Image (cartoon, coloured by chain):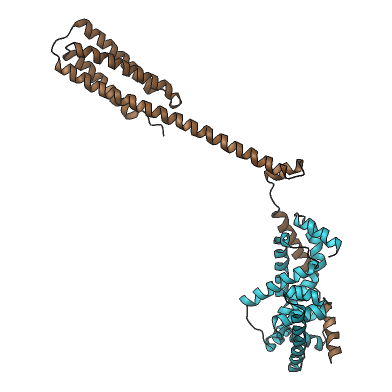
Amino acid sequence: MDNNLFKILKELKEIQPDADYSHKSKTLLLSGIGANKKRLSLADVFSSFYSNKLALGIASSVILLLIISGGIYYVKNQLNQNDLVVKASETNASIQVKLNEIQYLLQSHASIDANQILAIQAMLQNSADDLKAALSSKPEELDKSLQKLKAAEEMLYQIDELTKNIGIIYFCLCCLFLFYGFFENLASSEFRLD
Amino acid sequence: MIDGDKNLIEKAIKGEASAFGLLYDKYQPQIYRFIYLKVSHREEAEDLTHQVFLKSWQSIDRFNFQGFPFSSWLYSVARHQVIDYYRTKKTKITFEEIIEIETDDDSLAEAIDNELTIEKVKSAIACLGNEQQDVIILRFIEDLSLQEVASILEKTQGAVKLLQHRAIKNLRKAMNHGQ
């Protein structure tokens, strides 16, 4: 019985898969293998030129350097822009204070000289021109805009000095209102950098 | 390990499909046979064999050259595949079910020897427990060494000997039951 059993078991070795199935299965497997072939990495490209692990080290170092230098450039650029925005905001606030001061002085003085009126008018005109130039500057020309704002601010300081010594009432008030309307326009539209 | 095999495996690990194709040609019949004798259904065996080779390809880089042939690793993958199959399909198969499956499958009868005794042996193998089936197929049909079978089953050689003794005893019993 045992011998017969082992003999039959040996005969089971004759079992073979269907040839058509085997062919299809193999084709399917190999086509899948071709489709899933590994993609080339930067290290693979390097290793085709260099046979040791130095290539991987070089590739990593280059990538690291690019990332660091790119990061530094970006941060520096952002800092510069942020710095300019802060400065412009400070100037803007300063102009506002000066305008309020001028308005107060104009209201508190009774008499005025014609030459002084003309001088103040010219200075206000210059300030307005500077502010107009600052408004029309492109976002990338922030430092140029800042210079114009600074110039306008300087002009207003000078007007302030003048009005401290003289009495201006009606004429300068008109100029101030004109100028103030322009300034409001500037404040609402300027410094939208982000 | 045969040097030719080692060379093919190394190429397959590097992604050479043709190398894996040669390994497939060489080992697919015995893996199919192993699975077929365990599931007793041709189409299921075909699907499972395909899955075994697909998994083998996907994890071929994990194959270690530790003195055992590549086929041992494939048998191991096949074993787990069949265990998963039974876990999801059915937990136990009865002798009656085997007979029914065999008689329903006409192509099976054409492909293998028609002798009734052979059918009975096949059915009897299918009635054995999973590990006893493994031992009968690997030791007496595929002629693997005790050491190789022990490595596939992840057991000691002593444990395999014991398993083998019980498997033959139960196989005889199952054949008598079928008569």
Q: State which quarter of the image contains the C terminus of chain B.
A: bottom right
Q: State which quarter of the image contains the N terminus of chain B.
A: bottom right
Residue A135 on image: x %, y %: 37, 23
Residue B46 on image: x %, y %: 73, 72
In the picture provided, is B92 more to the left or to the right than A85? right
Q: Is residue A113 visible?
A: yes
Q: Residue at x 77, y 72 (%)?
A: B31
Viewer-closest of A28 and B173: B173
Residue A42 on image: x %, y %: 68, 43
Residue A181 on image: x %, y %: 26, 23
- The colour one sees for chain A in the rendered image is brown
Identify whether A189 is placed above or below B7: above
Q: Residue at x 62, y 39 (%)?
A: A63
Report which quarter residue A100 is drawn in.
top left
Q: Residue furthest left?
A: A110
Identify whether B100 is placed above or below A191: below
Viewer-closest of B71 and B155: B155
- The colour one sees for chain B in the rendered image is cyan
Report which quarter residue A49 is drawn in.
top right
